[in-house]
Image (cartoon, helix red, strand yellow):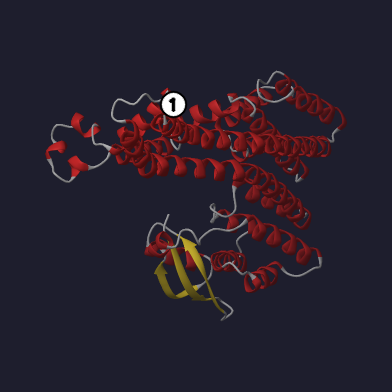
Amino acid sequence: MPQFSYTSITKGGKQVSGLVAAPNREGAIAEIRKGGGRPLLLHEVKAAKKRLSFKNKVKMKDMVVFSRELATMINAGVALPRSLETLAEQAENKFFKEIIQSVNHDVESGIALGDALAKHPNVFNDVYVNMVRAGESGGILADIMKRLATQVEKDASIRHKIRGAMAYPVVIMTVTIIAFFAIMLFIMPKIGKVITELGGSGASLPIYTRAMLGVSNFLIDSSIIGFVPVINKLPVIGSIPNVLFFIAAFVVLIIRFRRYIRTDKGKLWWHGRLLKLPIVGKVITKVIVARFARTFSSLMGAGVSVLDSLEITGKAVGNRVIQLELEDIAQEVKNGKSLGKQFLVSPHFPPIVGQMMQVGEETGKTDEILVKVADFYEEEVDTVIDSLASIIEPVMIVVLGGFVGLIAASVMGPIAGLSQQIGN
């Protein structure tokens, strides 16, 4: 939905600025007037967001600071509008600053904080919004904001560890691929020419040397274009080397794949495959269980009903397969079945979750028990990621060393052999 930047006058005569989401200009004006404001300036910011979309993001660090400071100020007795105004003034992220100003404007107009946050789904997700609503209705907004800050910190910590573990192998693989194409396209042709000059066209070469020279020649020539009878007649297109067609095909394949996994069908297929991957699937499952336990615990502690908590948590775990499973569990609970027993028979959740759920149902402390489950699985994730990182690094070094050794053997072996023959 388009967003409009506005400046308006409140009933008290105060001038405020912010963002409002509406289908068109008339809808934006109606929304501002509905909140008790009289619009002075109004313009759509949709085009600007497209040009600077990489800037219109709110980091988790900003969300943590916002949640903790808002909780502190509310707990100290500072009025909500004044708290939001202070947070907007000190926000370093200009986009987040505008969002907070818009939320503050809605709150000053009489809109509940949860409803005001819901207008910005790209910043405040369903879990965040519903927990704030539960805090408002229960009069425990300060406590809820502290829970949210802790939850965002935990999510950020897990993501940081996963990205950190993946950084090294990704860099090594990228360097290896670039080096491979550079050697195949620029170095191997010259080496092949030297070997031919030394030993002649009939020189006997090792099989790995012949294989690498064959790959190099295939990437350089334009044989693939022969399969396209119309395009290969064009003088410029007909001279394009095969490697460019491989790169173009790879890019197109990646784009089409990314589009497919964004559809409902593709997302369900892809998320199911991820859970079945060896090693990686176990890590993903542990991350999902930890996220589920902490989110569900926070919602239950905030007074949200079990069915609503399952629905909201399903959207927060980040896996479509698990989301559908939680929806099925919610339906069974709605039919009168035990929540803990449903998790015990779940194909994706480990038995400890169901057992802890049953204990929570018996003691009435589901939220406290699930916090311990979340802590346990977050430690498991940390341990597994650290172990993978320690294994991946030497494996990647061996792979890169093997590649370099193959290149050296393919080049130096034939040259040494031919030099010896010439010497004799």
Judging by the rendered image, the residue that carries numbered circle 1 is: 208
Among the 4 quarters of the image, the one containing residue 272: top right
User: Among all residues in the image, which is located at the extreme right?
Assistant: 363
Whether residue 249 is visible, yes or no, is no
Q: Amino acid at mark 1?
A: Tyr
Q: Residue at image x 71%, y 24%?
A: 343
Instruction: Describe residue 192's horizontal placement relative to residue 363 as left or right.
Output: left
The answer to whether residue 50 is above or below residue 424 is below
Q: Residue at image x 50%, y 43%?
A: 174
The answer to whether residue 210 is above or below residue 314 is above
| Secondary element at tag 1 | helix
x, y percent for residue 59: 61, 57
For the image, the number of numbered tags is: 1
x, y percent for residue 315: 59, 39
Q: Residue at image x 62%, y 65%?
A: 107
x, y percent for residue 92: 61, 69
